[in-house]
Amino acid sequence: MTQASENNVISEDVSKLESATDNVDHSQSGHDNNVEEDLGENKDENKTGKNSQAEEGTDESLASPPPKNTRMKGYFVIAIVSFVNYAAADVKKDGEFNTPININEDESGLTIVMVSSIISMVLCSFMVIIGLDRFTRLQRYWKQVIQPKSKIELVILVFLVIWWTVFTFIITAVTGVAGGGSRLYNVYFSTWICLITSFWTLERWVVRAGYMTSLYDFMMESPNRSAGWMVLGIASILNLLFHVNTKNNWDSAVINLEDEDKQKNVKDYFDNIYSNGQPEWVIALTIITAIVSVVFILIEIFRNNRSAQQSEQPEIEIKMEGIMLFVLTICWVPTGFFVTTIGGVANAISNIYFFTWLCTILVVYSFVSWVRYWREMVWRVIEKQDAEYNKAKQRTIQVDEQAGAEEKLEEEEKVEVKPEIRHSLW
């Protein structure tokens, strides 16, 4: 093959390679352009999607889980228990009053129970529904009702507390339909549960709004035994109120009985109870307990807080507190036993029955708490004395060791001086 033919072949190969590289460059640039176009389209789609979600405004909120709201538990309990209260009153209204010492045969009392239960049940059921609503378009408005620091919810809770406070006294007092001897236990207990749950739900709202700490934390952080005195004072005042109401109104409640034989039996029953001095003794003991509780609460409130040990009680105060708790204990334990047994003024299931036992238990608990505190105080004194004794012992040992070392040093000096004396004399 000649040199010219070889040069032609090489030039053809070079031209083929150049054309191939040009095609690759064109295809790569086209692919890059396509990718850029696709990315631009995706960005546009994302922008349009976000704009559409912003216009709708509720798609993501509908899918979000409901926030934690402990007040819903209170509304749910009140709604259920209100239904139980209504059902118990409705069943009793359809039946007959055949209890042995029932002094409340007026059906208007059952009507009061049913009306109070229906209103409470409807209101609390509405609060539960709006609290669980995560599907309708109205949820944006419901959030304004159940959000923290909501004035609407505060008004509802205050209404429930006042509502059940009034009707609890009307229904469970001696002249009420669920008073002592009525044996309408479902009406009695469901009424009290609604009242207690209303207070608990209001307390949850106040804590969630940030106005104060929980009642439990407040009681646990109270210095000394002031929390026990506060609870005992409240229980004593309520017990006094219910005992005075029972003593003054039991005879007027008996008059409402239609059966003369039953009226005579019930009147003799209460005459026997209120003629032996039990009511006067319980009322006097409750007044003394309330006064003592208020005194110790005021002492704790007005205690001098300028010192570093502001929660420490003086020794005289601790002794007086122990003496008062011991006296109240030996008075309340037999009182709670005899008053709530057969023939006692609080033998029937009623307010005075439960609050008499509540005062008894609180007094015993406070006395046991004081004894525990006294033992700890004695142990701290003994521990302090032991520490001082050990410290003095160590100081004595050090003094003895130092004295012994000085004596030994003097003896060594004497031994060293004696030869010199002998040598000089010699």
Image (cartoon, grey):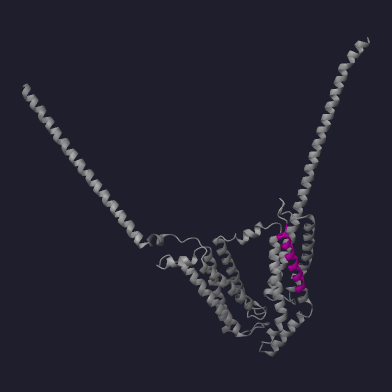
Residue 188, image x, y percentages: 62, 75
Residues in magenta, as a range: 282-303
Query: In the picture shown, does residue 291 fall above or below 166?
Result: above
The N terminus sits in image quarter: top left
Query: Does the magenta run of residues contain 322?
Result: no
Query: In the picture shown, does residue 161 fall above or below 259?
Result: above
Question: Between residues 279 and 407, which one lies in front from this camera angle?
Answer: 407
Residue in view at x 70 percent, y 82 percent: 249
Could you say which quadrant of the image residue 14 lies in? top left
Residue 135, image x, y percentages: 41, 66
Residue 304, image x, y percentages: 73, 56
Q: Is residue 131 visible?
A: no
Could you say which quadrant of the image residue 257 lies in? bottom right
Residue in view at x 89 percent, y 13 percent: 420
Q: In screen coordinates, is 396 left or right of 124?
A: right
Residue in view at x 79 percent, y 40 percent: 390
